[in-house]
Amino acid sequence: EVQLLESGGGLVQPGGSLRLSCAASGFTLWSYAMSWVRQAPEKGLEWVSGISGSSDSTYYADSVKGRFTISRDISKNTLFLQMNNLRAEDSGIYHCAKVSSGWYGSAIDCWGQGTLVTVSS
Amino acid sequence: QSALTQPASVSGSPGQSITISCTGTSSDVGGYNYVSWYQQHPGKVPKVMIYDVSNRPSGVSNRFSGSKSGNTASLTISGLQPEDEADYYCSSYTSGSTLFGTGTKVTVL
């Protein structure tokens, strides 16, 4: 069974940093693209970042480019999102998401429950 | 990178058909056949209902169908049922990123 378990969220001041983790099980990270998608309270979905399957190609929304970095540890089957220079508008639930193929543009077929990030002073 | 445009709400009676639109540009919806639709019930994670414009994943009811014309994609729910009441989001590939729609709340009257 495919499972995604996020961790690392919390309360951080504006300008601060957080590192989110997503432990994947039931499949191999190397074989599939992965994405991070966030959802502010009572708001819609926003794609944040993606990484291709069998390559290290990474992609970012304009709103986070230069501040966030997506990466993975294949040996631990874990996906990461390093978030720096955080802003209030970055607050929300961050979902780790498995893409249905090795290409990040394919549909998402599995979502983690998410980890809450709150940026506030 | 602007969100794709969806109507805020759509409603229908049980048994009726409804259609949700998703409007983008020639750089996203109109340029690629990589449009997906997701259903999200309150407090739950999204579930893919349609991928690659019109394909239905295994296990999704055939009451859900997708199509595209120009820069606008559509999700049609036929034979509306109470459990279809949820938020629906479209998504499209665009060069270098992925875009989600603004979301549509479907209400079953």
Image: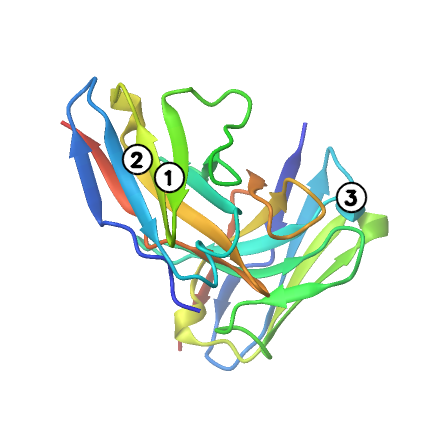
Mark 1 → mark 3, Cα distance in angstroms = 30 Å
Return the residue nearer the eye: A106 or B106. Answer: A106
Query: Which secondary structure, mark 3?
Result: helix
Mark 2 neighbour class, 10 Å CA radius: few under 14, some 14 to 19, many 20 or more: some
Label 1 and label 2: CA atoms lie apart by 11 Å
Position of residue A55 measured from the top left corner of the image (x, y, whole percent): 80, 57
Q: How many marks?
A: 3
Observer-nearest of B49 and A66: B49
Q: Which residue is mark 1?
A: B43
Question: Residue A7: image x %, image y %?
Answer: 60, 53
Q: Amino acid at mark 1?
A: Gly
Q: Secondary structure at mark 2?
A: strand
Look at the image and tell me whether residue B100 can be seen. Answer: yes
- The foreground one among B47 and A7 is B47
Indicate the quadrant containing the N terminus of chain A: top left, top right, bottom left or bottom right: top right
Q: Position of residue A87 (x, y in %)?
A: 45, 76
Q: Is label 1 or label 2 in front? A: 2
Tell me the residue at 80%/48% (across/down): A30
Q: Chain of mark 1?
A: B
Q: Which residue is mark 2?
A: B86
Q: Specify the subunit that label 3 lies on.
A: A
- Quarter of the view holding residue A52: bottom right
Q: Residue at x 24, y 36 (%)?
A: B106
Residue found farthest to the right = A75
**Discs 1 and 3 share one subunit:** no
Q: Are marks 1 and 3 in contact (CB under 8 Å)?
A: no
Amino acid at the residue labelled 2: Ala
Which residue lies under the disc numbered 3?
A31
